[in-house]
Image (cartoon, rainbow, N blue to C red):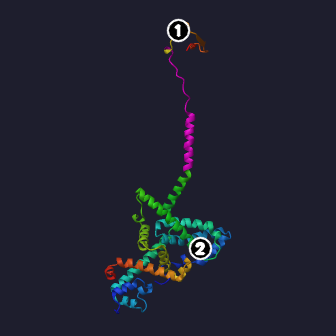
Amino acid sequence: MNDLTCVTARELMLDAEPSELHARGDSPLARHLRACADCARAASAILAMTDDLAHALDTLAAAPAAKPRADRSKLRRLTIALAPLAAAALVLIVLWQRNQEPALEPIVLPVQDVPTVPVVNVPAGGTVAVMRASNPNITIVWNLES
Amino acid sequence: MAAGTLTSPGTLRDDATIDQLARAAQQGDELARARLLAAVRPRILRWAIVHSGAPDDAEDITQQALLTVHRQLESFAHGSRFTTWLYTLTRRIAADWLRTRSRRARLLETRGAPQETSTQRHDEHGRLVALVRAQLAGLPARQRELFDLVDLQGYTPLEAADLLGMNHNTARVHVLRARRAVRARILAAHPNAAEELQ
């Protein structure tokens, strides 16, 4: 082992060129790494992790477009595109339903509920107008005094 | 680690081919345009991962960048290398994207919504994403970019500086700072190394 201490060697490893970490050349660090197994393992760890990182980036960069994410985006775009159409359809349905609402039905009383005797009381001396409708069952009595 | 030993340079560094495709595409060659977009996608994706430090967002950034290249290709005047233009464009889009994501994250935080992280996934992709996140965490974007170009892809600091359109000495400083931070983290996790460095 040369005169480099392990602490100094590890400090130098932080800035060293990769070739030095491979213990190539005649630099003090390279010589130390050839002589010190512990520091050589630390240098190997740096090289291995750097290599792993490079491999990870190579792999991620070469990967085809991520399908699930693309599908999600497509779905989101589709949803955004269809939202106004859905709103318009909803308005049309509401309008259509309003038009379909039945007109108010006339209240038809059962025949037995219609009094056969007129129930209009006119004060003595009063004036009324009596009108007959085309329906013979209907007689309109209009009290002109009130 | 010799230059270019960690990655396949042919796939990422064939700038001459990319320049040729760009020129042909600008002259209306639709096939060249399609080939150009396919050729630059891995590069943009890698930049997006490294720049954002968030592999989950990189695919979206890449799609946006490819769309921008497609739309603005005619505006590239070959005043610089095409890859430099591409890099600048990707960087701007990534920065915009991260600002938007940051706003969205703050909004979700105030609403108390849980945020899914990629580290919750247990497949190989998730493992790689977690590795990238862990190793590049805490580095400024510039340092991540230069560390990737020089220490991981094998560019020289001068080549990387030219590609990024920055001062050579500044590029060297960024590389050294990033290298130091990444390696210190690795050594800290290495048995017997942590106490010796203290």
Q: Position of residue A126 (x, y in %)?
A: 56, 9
Does B117 sit above or below residue B156?
above
| Residue A45 - label | none
- Circle 2 is placed at which residue position? B85
Q: Alpha-carbon neighbours of circle 2 within 10 Å: few (<14), some, or many (≥20)? A: many
Identity of the amino acid at label 2?
Trp
The answer to whether residue B77 of the structure is visible from this angle is yes
Q: Which residue is mark 1?
A: A123
Q: Nearer the viewer, mark 2 or mark 1?
A: 1
Q: Is residue B139 magenta?
A: no
**Which chain does the numbered disc 2 sit on?**
B
**Residue at 53 percent of width and 57 percent of height:** A74
Tell me the magenta residue range.
A83-112
Q: Position of residue B39 (x, y in %)?
A: 57, 72
Q: Nearer the viewer, residue B13 or B181?
A: B181
Residue B101 or residue B155, whichever sits in front: B101
Q: Is residue B98 left or right of residue B121?
A: right
Quadrant in the picture for the N terminus of chain B: bottom left
State whether residue B41 appears in this view.
Answer: no
Residue at (55% x, 32% y) in the render: A101
**Circle count:** 2
Point out residue A82 in the picture as x, y percentages from the top left corner: 55, 51
Q: Amino acid at mark 1?
A: Pro
Relative placement, left or right, of B81 versus B191 is right
Taking the spot 43% from the left edge, 70% from the top edge, the residue there is B133
